[in-house]
Image (cartoon, rainbow, N blue to C red):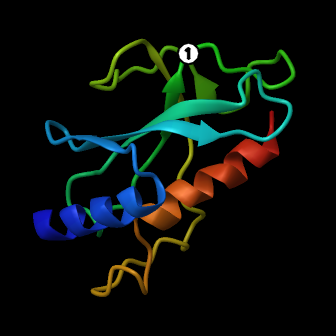
Amino acid sequence: MQTRIEQELELLRHYYPPLKYNSAGQWALIPCYPLPAGWNREATEVAFQIPVAYPGNPPYGIYVPVGIRFQSTLPNNYKEPADVQVPFDGKWGIFSWQPEDGQWRATGDLVAGSNLLNWVRGFSKRFQEGI
């Protein structure tokens, strides 16, 4: 499945060119993910881990640098610091977030089914929720 991951990372880089990848543990970082109004940042770094047995297993969690708040309030389903620290600089928190039940449907054609690009674009849904 490493070829699939490499192809998906290239797809992500097309839309998020500064994407960084750490193959130890399969971590990806997008340095500047835009946030809607209400957050204490206009944009944030986001990181996620590509799970073992991907794409059969969907990713889980949105990691952001600690200190993120929505209207000065700690968001729901968010923990800082995260139990697992990402291999990028700083301390990180995690939003407990995953594709909605039954929504992860990876196929042999990486653009026809669920993929990392759809996953990352889905972060905006969580950030639109605010608290």
Taking the image as shown, residue 95 lies to the left or right of residue 14, namely: right
Tally of numbered discs:
1
Taking the image as shown, residue 78 lies to the left or right of residue 83, namely: right
Say what secondary structure mark 1 lies in: loop
Task: Give the residue number, with chain letter if any, for mark 1.
Answer: 66
Image coords of residue 123 (percent x, y)? 60, 50
Q: Which quadrant would residue 80 be assigned to in this image? A: top right
Which image quarter holds the N terminus?
Answer: bottom left
Image coords of residue 119 (percent x, y)? 50, 60
Q: Amino acid at mark 1?
A: Val
Note whether 75 is above or below 29 in the view shown.
Answer: above
Which image quarter holds the C terminus?
Answer: top right
User: Who's the residue at 37% across and 77% down the image?
Assistant: 106
Taking the image as shown, residue 32 lies to the left or right of residue 75, namely: left
Which one is in front, 42 or 108? 42
Which one is in front, 40 or 99? 40
Image coords of residue 103 (percent x, y)? 55, 73
Image coords of residue 43 (percent x, y)? 65, 33
Note whether 17 is above or below 6 in the view shown.
Answer: above
User: Who's the residue at 47% across and 60% down the image?
Assistant: 15
Which one is in front, 36 or 26? 36
Q: Residues within 10 Å of mark 1 (few under 14, many from 20)?
A: some
Taking the image as shown, residue 84 lies to the left or right of residue 7, namely: right
